[in-house]
Amino acid sequence: MKTTLDELQAFVAVVDTGSITAASELLGLTISATSRTLGRLEEKLQTALLRRTTRRLELTEEGATFLQHARAILASVDEAEEQMAARRKRPAGRLRVDAATPFMLHVLVPLIEGFRARYPEVELELNSNEGITDLIEKRTDVAFRIGVLKDSTLHARPVGTSRVRVLASPAYLQRHGMPVEPAELEQHVLLGFTQPETLNDWPLRSANESTMRIRPTIASSSGETLRQLALAGLGIVCLSDFMTQEDRSSGKLVQLFPEQTVEVRQSINAVYYRNTALAARITCFVDHVVEALGQRPFDG
């Protein structure tokens, strides 16, 4: 009896999620159904693919080898389906998108309604992660990353750039005073990032330096958390224009040290693993984002 796609999907889902329970939720199946499917696959192959312990599931040597073939088969089926959809000029299928929370909320979410109107057959799955995401492990089709790319295995398409500025709310400045020189920041509450530390290099001329490394009084891994703290008047922050444009326009946040600020721009890239025969659903989504951002620049 031949292996079925359902069995391959169940096996890959269990590996990717780390458990039969999580895989069942992902696939929309009962736990018993997923377990039976996995057992049927091992019976057909006459080998154990996973080693079950009391704490987790681990791939056997045979399972690791079979996993590579299973992924390749499923990717080929996906590509065949996508090519058929592309021939009909109707991109279709599930599209898994990953981005840091601020970019997801302030840039991508406002674009979803327009995208869905143009491509109703694409099923979107939007995930937010503050750190670097392993695209294969998280089964991500395209991720949007801010800043310098370090993963050489990724293919990147530039989406745009966004300037960073030092900001504070009028309420904070009323209580603590307006700093005139960057050196005065030592006397203020500074909102910064836990990681990476390079995000705490603020674009301010100080002595002979073109940037100033600050030590956060309050730190967070999330830019959106820092934005909310700044809006609440709890400190001074340095954030990218893409997430503060409306705050600056409305006066909820004001820029500090405009004369001493160096123009530093963060690069924004759409990244993915496949470069040739790129899925139509990925291409149309990235095209939609690039088109929209070209009509609505961040700076202002």
Image: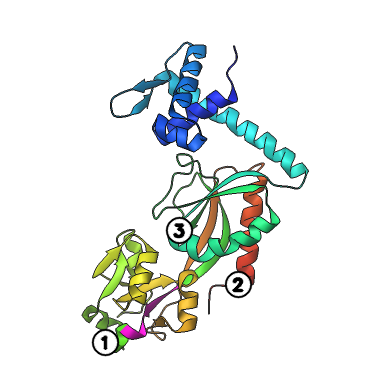
Circle 1 is placed at which residue position?
175
Q: Which circle marks residue 296 in the picture?
A: 2
Nearer-N-terminus badge (1/2): 1
Helix, strand or loop for disc 1? helix
Q: Is residue 16 magenta?
A: no
Nearer-N-terminus badge (2/3): 3
Q: Which amino acid type is marked by label 3?
A: Val
Along the viewing direction, whichever of 259 and 111 lies nearer the viewer:
111
- Percent position (x, y) of residue 116? 65, 56
The magenta-colored residue range is: 164-171
Q: Which amino acid type is marked by label 2?
A: Arg
- Percent position (x, y) of residue 78? 63, 35
Nearer-N-terminus badge (3/1): 3
Circle 3 is placed at which residue position?
148
Helix, strand or loop for disc 2? loop
Alpha carbons under labels 2 and 3: distance apart:
23 Å
Q: Is residue 167 magenta?
A: yes
Screen quadrant of the N terminus = top right
Alpha carbons under labels 1 and 2: distance apart:
34 Å
Along the viewing direction, whichever of 27 and 66 lies nearer the viewer:
27
Query: Of tags 2 and 3, which is closer to the observer?
Result: 2
- Percent position (x, y) of residue 244? 45, 74
Q: Which amino acid type is marked by label 1?
A: Arg
Tell whether 76 sits left or right of 50: right
Q: Is residue 281 visible?
A: yes
10 Å crowding of disc 3: few (<14), some (14-19), many (20+): few
Along the viewing direction, whichever of 56 and 185 lies nearer the viewer:
56
Tell whether 276 sits left or right of 253: right
| Vertical arrangement, residue 35 with respect to residue 209, above or below | above
